[in-house]
Image (cartoon, coloured by chain):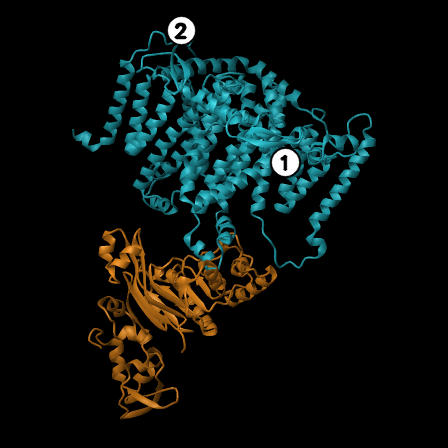
Chain colours: A orange, B cyan
Amino acid sequence: MSEPVIKCENVYKIFGANAQKMLQDSNGNVDAKTFQKNGCIVGVNNASFEVSKGEMLVVMGLSGSGKSTLLRCISRLTDATGGKIFIEGQDLLQLNNKDLIDLRRNKMGMVFQSFALLPHKTVVENIAFPLQIKGIKTEDSISKAMDMVKLVGLDGRENYFPRELSGGQQQRVGIARSLAVEPDIWFLDEPFSALDPLIRKEMQDEFLRLQDKLQKTIMFITHDFDEALKLADRIAIMKDGIIEQLDTPANIVLNPATEYVRKFTEEVPREKVLLIEDVMETSQENLGNLKVSKDEIIENVAEKILTQEKAVAVIDENNKIIGSINPSKIINTVFGGRKNNN
Amino acid sequence: MELLKKYPKTFQWLFLLIVFFALCFAIDVPETYKFIRGQAEFVKDPNQSSYVFLGKEVRYYAFDVFWRLPPLLGWLPIWINDSLFFLMNDWMPIEVWNEDTQEFKSRPIVLQISRNLTAFMTFLIELIREILLGGLETIVAFTSWDWIDKNPWAELPGLPWTIVAAGAALLSYKLSGKGLALFAGLTMVYISVFGQWKPSMQTLSFILVAAPLSFIFGLGLGIAAFKSKRVEKALYPILLVMQTMPQYAVLVPALVLFGVGDHAAVIITMVVAIPPMILLTLLGLRAVPLEVIEAGRMSGCTNIQLMFKVLIPTARRDILIGVNQVIMVCFSMAVISAFIGAKGLGFNLLLALNQLNIGLALEAGLCISLIAILLDKMSLAWANKQTDYFGNLTFYQRNKNFLFFVAIFVIGIALAYIGNYLFKDTFNYLFEIPHNKGISTADFWNKGVDWIFDTFFVYIKAFNTWLIQEVLQPMRALYLRMPAIATIVLVVGAGYLIGGLRSALVVCALTLFIAFSPWWDRALVTAYMATFGVIVSCIIGFTVGTLCFQNKHSANFMLGVCDIFQTFPSFVYLIPVMMLFGITDTSVLIAVIVYATIPATRYTIEGLRSVPAGLHDAATMSGVNKFQRLTKIEFPLAFPHMMLGINQTIVFALFMVIIGAFIGTEDLGQYILKALSDKKGAGIGLTLGICVAFIALIFDNLIRAYVQKRKKHLGID
C-alpha cells in the first residue's frame, strides 16, 4: 500500500483559554491532572496512527474518552491544538477555508449519532443537500439522491420528513446523505448508538454490506466493544484522550496491552472474534482428513472440529497446509480460564 | 428557635413584611399630601421647590424624604428633549444639494438622515397604496408635478377590489389550500361590502412595508447577535427595555425625529417590532443542535450557506413565532400610530371610539383583526410550503396559478369597466366601494349598546359603583399610602430573598429610577391597576387553563382561541368594554383582564403539558385521584412555566393599562398621552415609557430569578 489516507502525528486537543501555551511548555508530556488544575481539559492526548485505503478503523472508548474529539480533529470540525494531520498527504491544518470546504465537498462524508437531519427537508432533499451545496443542478442532485435512497432501502419514503421516520430509518437517511457526494473517507460518529439493539444489529449488517460494496476508508466511533469487534479491521481503544491500544480485534482479545483493555476483553465471546489462524499450532503431525481455512472464525467451524478425534489441518488460501488445530484447543479457547490463556 | 431553623425562608419573609409595615406606620402622611374625593388628585404643597441641574431649573413638590423621594431625575426629560432638538437642529451640519434652489444648503446630519428615511418610507408606502387604490404620488416621485400637469393620463388607476379579493384567495389557495382561500376571499368581500376598502388598503399598505422591513432587520440583527458576543451584549439591555416599554411611549420621540404621517408610523412600528424578532431569532439559532451544524459543515457549506440553508431553516419554528409577533405588533401599531397621523383603519377606529360610536369602532376593529389573522396564517403557510420534485408537470400545471391570476385580472378590469355604465349615477361598486357607502351594521350595534345600557343600566351601574367604591378605591388608597422608603425596602428585600445580592441590586436600581423620577405617585396608580388586573387574570387564566387541560381537545381548542385573541390589536379590546361600562376605570380594568388572561391561560396549559408522561404514570400507580395528581404532581412541576406566564401577564396588563389612558385613567399612561400633544413632550414621553418598562422589569427580574432557582431545585431544564 502506498500512502495512508489518514495519518495523524502526535495530535493533541486541549480545551481551555491558554491551551496552546501550556502544550508548548509541557514539551509533549501532557498530564491531564496538572492541566485540569490550570483550567484546561485534555480531549486528545498524543494520538498517532495511520489508516490506509479501504481500511476500517474503529475507535472505541467510553464517554468522555476523547474519541469524538479525535474524529472532529480529523474532520477539522475543531482545530487540533498540536500535532499534524494528513489527509491523502495534504496537511489538513494548513488548508485554508476554501480548500477545506472543497475537501469536505468531495472527499469526506460523516454520519452523526443523533442523525443531524435537517428537519425542514424531506428524505430526498436531505440526501441531495450536500450535492446542492456543491452547486449541482436541482434535477441532477435529486436523481442522484434517489439512487442513494434505493441504496439504503428507503424507496417509497423519499417524500417523508425526518420526524415521520423511525430512528433506524433516520440513520439510513444520514448514511445516504454522507455517501451522496461519493466520498473516499467516511466518518461515522456512534451511528448506531441511539438505536434499539435489534435495529442496531440490522444496521450493522447493512453497514457491512455497504462497505463490502463501496470499500471506503472509514473511521468509526463507538462505545460498544462488541460492535467494534464485529466491524473493525483494526480497533483503537481510547481512555482519557490516550490511545491505549491500536491493533486487530484478535490481537486485542488475545493480548490486551493494559489492564483497562483487559477489562473489556474479559467478557468477549472469543469464538466469535478469533480466527483459526490466531489459535492454531504450527506442528503438522498426526492430522485428520478435515481441513479448515485459516481465515474462518472459530464459531463457524467449532462444531466440525469438535466432532474430530485427530487434529485438524489448517490451510491457507492456496490450499497449502500451514498448521493444525486440536479439538481440545477449541474447548480451551471457548471455555478455558481466560486469564491464564495467553 | 427550632422552627426558625426549620423554615428559615419563611421567617426571612416574615421579617421583611414586619419591617415593611413598621415603616408604613412609622412614617406619617405629610399634611400637604391628601386625596381629594378619594380620587388620585393630590393637594400638593402650593409652594413648589426647585433646583438647578446642568443649567436647567427643575420644579417639584417637596415632601418628607422618607415619604416621597425628591425627584432627582427631574432634569432627565428636559435633557432628553434638549438633546433631541440639538441633534435635529445644530449637530454636525453637512452640505446638501437642494434641487429646487439649485444650490448647496447646510443642514444637520440627523435631520438629513431623517429626511431621506422619510422620503424612502413614504415612497414605499405610496407605491403599494397606489397599486391598491390608485394615485399620482409614485409617478411624481420619478418625474415631477409639471410633468403630471402636462400628461393628465399619467395616473396609477388602482386595482378593482374584485381583483385584490380574488388574488388574495388564489394566493392563499396556493400557499395552504381551500380553507384559507375561502377565509381570504370572505374577509376581502366583507371588507369591501362594508365600505372599509379604502382604510383597509391604507392599513395594509402600511403593514406590507413595516412587517417585511421589521422581519429583515430583526433577522439580520439576530444573526449578528448570534455571531458576535459583543453585539449581543450591546443589544440585550435595549431589547429588554424595548420589550417592556409601552408602545405609546415611543411615539413621542418619533414625532420629534420624523414628524407626522405614515412614514413616521412605519419607522416607529419597526422600532417596536424588531426587538422581539431579534430575541426569537437568537433563541432559535441557539437551539439548533450542534450535530446539525456539524452536518452542515461536513456537507461543505460555506459560512453563508450554513446560515441560510442550515441554521435558519432549522430554527424556523422560533423565527416563525417571531414573524407572528412582528405581524401582531404591526397591527397593534397600525392603530396606535393613528395618534401620529397614520391613515387607515386605526384612524377610523380611534375616531369612532372618541365619538363613542361603538358600532363603527366595532366594524373597523373587526376589519383589522380579520386582516391580521389572514396575514398571520398566510405567513405561516408560506414558511411550511413544500416543493414537489417528482410531478411531471405540463406547462399549464406549472403556470396554472399565474394563468388564473391573469384571468382574474382581465375579468376584474372588465367588470370594473362594465360597472362604469351600470352604476352611472352612483359609485362604481365593482371598482371600489367608497368609505361609509357600503352596508353598515353600526346602527344596529349602537342600538344594541343603547338597549343593553337602558335595560341593564341599573345593574351595570350598581356593579360599577360597587367595584369602584369597595375594591378599587381602597386598593388605590393603600398603594398610595405606602411611603416610598417602605416600598423600596419591600421590593429590594424580595429581590434579595429570591435572587440574592445581584438580583437585589438590579431591582434596587430600577426602583430608584422610578422613585427619583417626578412620577412616583402615578407609577403607584399604574402598579395598582396592573396588580388588580394581573391577580384577576391569573385566577381566571389558571382556572380556565386547568379545566381545559383535563381534556386534550378542549386544551387544543383553548390554545387556538388564545392564538386568535392574541392577533387582535390591543385597542380592539377597548371596544366591547366601552359598550358596557362607558368611560370608567372599570372599562380599562376589564380590558386589562381580558387581554392579560390570554398569556395566563396559554402558559398554564403549556406548563401542565410539559409535565413528563412518566410522572403521570408514576402518580397513577401510586393511587392518586385526579385532584391529588393535580395538586401534588402537576402544579408543582408546571409552576415554573406558569410563572413565566405571569411574567407575560404583567407585561400585557401594563400595556393595556397604559393604552387605557385613552379612555381616561389617571396613571402614567395619561401623561404619555398628554406628552403627545406637547411640543416638549419627547423627553417626558420617553422617560415615562422607561418608568413603565422598569415596573415590568422589576417583576420580570424577580420572577425569572425565582423560576431559575425553582427549576434547578426540581431538576427540570
Residue B190, image x and y in percent?
67, 32
Residue B3, image x and y in percent?
19, 30
Q: Residue at x 44, y 49 (%)?
A: B288
Where, by quadrant of the figure, is residue B651 drawn? Answer: top left
The span from disc 1 to disc 2 (Cα, nearest Å) is 53 Å
Q: Secondary structure at mark 1?
A: helix
Mark 1 closeness class: few <14, some 14–19, many ≥20 residues within 10 Å: some
Left or right: residue B23 versus residue B644 is left
Task: Find disc 2 in the rendering and name its residue.
Answer: B46
Where, by quadrant of the figure, is residue B226 drawn? Answer: top left
Residues A162 and A105: in front is A105
Residues B74 and B305: in front is B74
Residue A130, image x and y in percent?
51, 60
Q: Is residue A130 above or below residue A245?
A: above
Q: Is residue A3 above or below residue B191?
A: below
Task: Find disc 1 in the rendering and name its residue.
Answer: B124
Q: Are marks 1 and 2 on the same chain?
A: yes
Residue B675, image x and y in percent?
50, 19
- Amino acid type at mark 2: Pro
